[in-house]
Amino acid sequence: MSLLNKIGIMQGRLSPPKNNLIQHFPKNWRVEFNHCQSLGLKSIEWIFEEHDIKFNPIFNPEFFKNFLIQKKMFGVEVNSVVADYFMKNKLFQENDVCLKQNLITLKKLIINCNKLNIKIIELPLVDSSSLKNEKNMQEFKSNISDVLNFAKRLKVKISLETDLEPKKFFNYIKTFNSTNLYINFDMGNSASFGFDPEKEIEILSRYIINVHIKDRVYKGNTIELGKGDVDFKKVFKMLKKIGYNGDLILQAYREDINNNNKNYLKTIEKYKNFTITQINNA
């Protein structure tokens, strides 16, 4: 399948910003399926966070049926979940009681994703949950080893997003000795860290299962697509070269933050068209 048919959107981008947050789970989540279809996007990457958790259909069985109905009605897939919940409720550097509860929550999320046919759970290990040193890395590995096997039995893949240098990340992934652990490639973060996307994608290629579309400046913040330091042509050329066929999730800069003159749906349409052009030119 062509990459042009794999463009999706991060949840929350199809809703007005909440408290000027870049990304959030919207309580009125149903309307995003309609917007997604209208914009010709193929999928929504769901957000699992602590706020409003009781209203989140992937964590509350009361909403399971309606969630599946919305997917079918609008022909929109939900293939992945970004588990922002674990950026605050971490899977390392926690006391025994908190860690146990966090792992229980993760296992419940895995069970629910299995029931809802969601294939990937992404664990963000960046910013507040970054693996700062070898001790963090070893602790995280030890804490989720059993979870990886549990997820594999339920046919749910676990993906990591980190700020580790590509070779170090590759070597770290190998130490898990797991066939159920993968990588999320975020092109914006890669540019911000100063990584060469050609080398990074080549090194990590066998593990890349999901891709975030974003633009950032070197050592700086997220910015409008095409205005930062991401070499989109090189990125998409490499993704084609390695035969990547997973989702391309728009997680781009929100132009409507603190700007009522910008419409979030028009921004997404612009970003979709930009992405299509970049893929075609790669």
Image (spheres, rainbow, N blue to C red):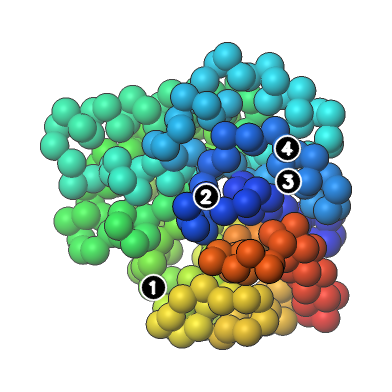
Give amino acid for label 1: Glu
Residue under the point 43% across and 71% down: 166
Residue 265, compared with residue 201, is above or below; it is above
Closer to the eye: label 3 or 1: 3
* Dot 1 crowding, Cα within 10 Å, few <14, some 14–19, many 20+: few
Left or right: where does residue 216 sit relative to residue 282?
A: left
Residue under the point 32% across and 31% down: 103
Residue under the point 73% across and 46% down: 43
Residue 158, compared with residue 192, is above or below; it is above
Residue toward you, 270 or 161: 270
Q: Residue furthest front?
A: 260
Residue toward you, 13 or 260: 260
* Dot 3 crowding, Cα within 10 Å, few <14, some 14–19, many 20+: many
Q: Which residue is mark 3?
A: 43
Give amino acid for label 4: Val
Closer to the eye: label 2 or 1: 2
Lower sequence index among marks 4 and 3 = 4
| Quadrant assignment for the C terminus | bottom right
**Quadrant location of residue 224?**
bottom right
Closer to the eye: label 4 or 1: 4
Measured Cα–Cα span from mark 4 to mark 1: 38 Å
Lower sequence index among marks 2 and 3 = 2
Q: Which residue is mark 2?
A: 18
Measured Cα–Cα span from mark 3 to mark 1: 29 Å
Closer to the eye: label 2 or 3: 2
Measured Cα–Cα span from mark 4 to mark 3: 14 Å
Q: Which residue is mark 4?
A: 31
Lower sequence index among marks 3 and 1 = 3
Image spot of residue 18 (x, y percent)? 52, 49
Q: What numbered label is drawn on residue 165?
A: 1
